Image (spheres, grey):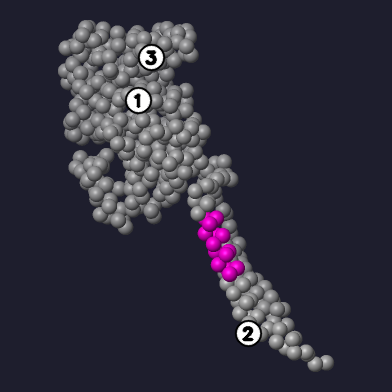
Amino acid sequence: MEMNQSEKISFSVERRRRIALNVVGSIVGLLAILIFLNILGMRHFIRLHLDSRDSSKLSPMTTEALKKLERDVKVILLFEKELPLYSSIDNLLREYENASPRISVERVDYTREPQRAENIKKRYQLVLPELKEKTYFRNLVIFDIPGRTPRVIYEKEFSDFNVNNYVSGKESEIKRVTFKGEMLFTGALVSLLESSQKIAYFSEGHREHSLKDDNVNSGYSKFAEILKQSNIEVKGLSIWSEKEIPADCSLLIVGGPQDLLTEDEITKIDNYLSRGGSLLVLMPQLGKTGLEPLMKDWGIDVKDQLVYDPVSHWNYNPVVTNFNSQSPISRPLFGSMLLLPLCREVSKSSTAIRGPDAPQVVELFRSSTSGMGVSLNQKGEVVTEEGEQPAELSMAASVEKGALAGVRFGRGTTRIVVIGNSRFFDNRWLDATPANRDFTVLALNWLLDRTQLMGGVGPKAILEYQLSMSQAQLHLLVLIMILIVPGCVMGLGMIVWFWRRN
């Protein structure tokens, strides 16, 4: 049977041209639709977190705070992209950017863009926490709001570490167990956006440590840097020369006085606390300060004996892992380790007043159950007190009064933190472990009542998954991924090609 003429020319040149144009038009239209959808998606999108444990998922408190943000915030991520921590920080910052148009992030990898990194270093006068001199610094995040002191967050602040398994020999390395990115970022925003500047007065005139001193064994220059980074203005104060503690004092710091404070100065401090003030007392390792009776009135005993832990120590100095979960200062430090010089015993007084309106005293960290009360002889050697029984001995305590709902004392809540050795905050010990600096920041934030603004934001656990496979299973997996899967795809393609050809 012969084909008619119309069937022979059914795929003429003209028809093939129309088919080709139709295909090209369809492709162009599809590309246009895809481009339009991408543009629309960039402006209007929804991010879904399928895993509730995702460390980049923002808490409701942070989300609400970002919605109310009224000032532009410049964030600079100065970080090497190849580091494991970079992706966690970058993903979290993208969440902040997506939650508020007021947040803008500049990302700089100093290994690829050294000149930009150098300009940032000069602009913000970056200083290594461990070193005196200004140097090329790296791996940090800067929050900058015009008119405020920038908040710099260093790499080691982002994580808590599990040192217990390392010390006990169960693991060969110290592992990160939490990621504190959101807590640090939201905390930086809160401190930068506070309506009033926080002012800390540092006691002078009794041979205290100096915030301007960069001496490794006595200076407080690193502590001064932490105060500055926390957006706290610091002023010196000779208490004896003032009628009373200044009204704009947000925090009074007494840093290891070597000379006794006078009764008049003690009275002024007591009046300040009664009005709802905040006090940080850093006791000298030896000798009286005159503050001991006042601290006892507020429920804290400061003893002359030092705390030595024969089970957990480094050159006789305590290694602390025993933290009190009842305090917002010490609770976040679980799994961490404090290294501090020999401290006095600072504990809750047995004669402390009890009752709902009494000062609430909490011991912050203690030795192990093997703690011993000791003294130092003339050679500086540890001497155990005769008849001393091992026990958990406290080296720091906090006091709070006026925290009950509807109860206010003067201008606010009275808060006190007492630490058994002022050298804990000096340049040598402040960075002895990451947790030493963490404790300092936590104590300052609690004393300044910033923890209430940080409700619901805390460290997020880093989950570790382990896949155990035998050597035979590993070889089978390699075979499947390299040969079987690609071979199946290729075979299916050849079957389709052969079927369409016939």
Three-letter code, disc 3: Gly
Three-letter code, disc 2: Val
Q: Nearer the viewer, residue 465 or 469?
A: 465
Q: Which mark is residue 195?
A: 1
Q: Nearer the viewer, residue 25 or 98?
A: 25
> Can you name the residue that lies furthest to the right here?
1
For the image, the number of numbered tags is 3
Would residue 251 appear left or right of 159 to someone viewing this image? left
x and y, in percent, of residue 470 in the image: 58, 59
Mark 1 crowdedness (10 Å alpha carbons): few <14, some 14-19, many ≥20: few
> Can you name the residue that lies furthest to the bottom here?
2
Which of marks 1 and 3 precedes in the sequence? Answer: 1
**Quick check: can you spot residue 390?**
no
Quadrant of residue 388 within the rendered picture: top left
Residue drawn at (33%, 48%) of the image: 78
Marks 1 and 2, Cα distance to the nearest angstrom?
Answer: 77 Å
Which of marks 2 and 1 precedes in the sequence? Answer: 2
In the image, the segment drawn in magenta is: 25-38
Read off the residue under disc 2: 13
Residue drawn at (56%, 60%) of the image: 33
Read off the residue under disc 3: 412
Marks 3 and 1, Cα distance to the nearest angstrom?
Answer: 16 Å
Dot 3 and dot 1 residues touching (CB under 8 Å): no
Quadrant of residue 31 within the rendered picture: bottom right
Q: Nearer the viewer, residue 126 or 37?
A: 37
Q: Which SS class for mark 2?
A: helix
